[in-house]
Image (cartoon, grey):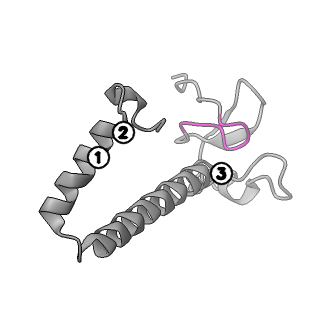
Amino acid sequence: MQLLAGLGPLGLPELLIIAFVVVLIFGVGRLPEVGGALGKGIREFRKATKEDDAAAGTTTLTSNAGAAPPAGSADAGASELAGGSDVRYCSECGAGNLATAKFCAQCGHQMAAPVR
């Protein structure tokens, strides 16, 4: 009854009234169908929230997909950074990043505005 705790005190008389109203609306023959549909809806809701949580965890990993590779990688983005584009260094970790990067590809720190 913890789910219903915010609604006030629900005792046996209140629950019997609710059950009576449900039987009046759906009928005795359809109660198993209604219960099954309710259970299926709850399972789908839980599955969707778990999928959303899992997707939220992966978006932080892929959000820097278009940015330069981390400074600790083998080529350290030399092919992209040496291609004539300006290089900005992160004030937090010192990694080289593309001039257009808003966040450091190594540590995720927000890049300072370019000095002109």
Q: Residue at x 64, y 56 (%)?
A: 83
Picture quadrant of residue 98: top right
Find numbered disc 1 in the image and state the secondary structure of the residue it sits on. helix
Task: Name, please, the residue furthest toward the left.
Answer: 25
**Dots 2, 1 in contact, CB < 8 A:** yes
Residue type, numbered disc 3: Ala
Q: Position of residue 105 (x, y in %)?
A: 67, 44
Tell me which segment is drawn in magenta. 102-108
Give the camera-side residue of 2 and 16: 16
Magenta span includes 25: no
Residue type, numbered disc 2: Leu
Q: Nearer the viewer, mark 2 or mark 3?
A: 2
**Which is the main secondary structure of the residues drawn in magenta?**
loop
Give the camera-side residue of 94 and 50: 50
Residue neighbourhood size for the residue with mark 2, other residues' Cα within 10 Å, grouped as few (<14), some (14–19), many (≥20):
few
In this rendering, the count of numbered labels is 3
* Disc marking residue 12: 2
Q: Residue at x 65, y 51 (%)?
A: 68
Q: Earlier in the sequence, mark 1 or mark 3?
A: 1
Question: Which residue position is annotated with label 3?
Answer: 68
Q: Position of residue 69 (x, y in %)?
A: 71, 53
Question: Which residue position is annotated with label 1?
Answer: 16
Picture quadrant of residue 99: top right
Residue neighbourhood size for the residue with mark 1, other residues' Cα within 10 Å, grouped as few (<14), some (14–19), many (≥20):
few
Q: Earlier in the sequence, mark 2 or mark 3?
A: 2
Residue type, numbered disc 1: Leu
